[in-house]
Amino acid sequence: MLGLHLLDASDRDPPGVSLAAPEAWLDAGERARFAELVEGAPRRELLLGRWLVKHVLATIYGVREPRLCVDAHGKPRLAGEGPRFSLAHAGGGLALVVGVGEVGIDLEPVRPVSEALREAALADDERARLGSDEEFFRIWTAKEAYMKRAGLGLAIAPRSLHVDLARGELRDDADGARHAFSWVRWGRFVVSWL
């Protein structure tokens, strides 16, 4: 079972949700954490992300009163048994993927990319055949989704991962394994998950 859920956080609050009164759906620890955040777009994205995870897990996957925790790598999880999820937010967009096993997701708004970023993020073979900025973000979001699924983030060197866009595969130099990924263009965003 796999579900993809997208939310535009730059708009108004979702129906029936007030970010001005998050105590209705945040537990005490979450309220304390979010009270420390400065008002603005990042705080809004974080709050909406927490709401989206809890709302989707409760209404679509039947997890009653989902309680979230973080694992040893800092990856958010359900406290107890249940589906796995991964959440990404950037530039006013939120993306959530839910699955039975480990999952990872990333989204990025398509924008101009500097040569320094291409050099840091892409393997030589990827840079050699790269066409557009959108292709860069298709590759980058696939890598980020893989790193999030592994729970290691940037502890995995992005250049050690090789993305084949035509096949929808990512290969990790560490073990040579190939991993299928999916992607979608959603408005101004590229979203990739596995």
Image (cartoon, helix red, strand yellow):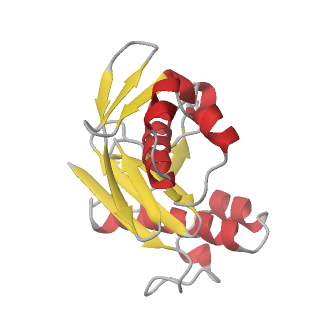
Q: Position of residue 78 (x, y in %)?
A: 44, 47
Question: Which residue: 55% across, 76% down?
Answer: 24
Q: Position of residue 109 (x, y in %)?
A: 53, 62
Question: Which residue: 51% across, 21% down?
Answer: 160
Q: In which quadrant is the C terminus drawn?
A: top left
Along the viewing direction, whichever of 92 and 54 lies nearer the viewer: 92
Q: Position of residue 81 (x, y in %)?
A: 34, 41
Q: Is residue 156 left or right of residue 191?
A: right
Q: Is residue 160 left or right of residue 20?
A: left
Along the viewing direction, whichever of 29 and 98 lies nearer the viewer: 98
Q: Is residue 43 above or below residue 4?
A: below
Q: Position of residue 96 (x, y in %)?
A: 41, 57
Question: Which residue: 37% across, 41% down?
Answer: 103
Q: Is residue 119 above or below residue 107?
A: above
Along the viewing direction, whichever of 171 and 17 lies nearer the viewer: 171
Say which quarter of the image contains residue 35. Answer: bottom right
Question: In this orientation, does residue 144 appear?
Answer: yes
Q: Is residue 174 above or below residue 111?
A: above
Q: Is residue 22 above or below residue 116?
A: below
Count of labels in the image: 0
Q: Is residue 154 left or right of residue 17?
A: right
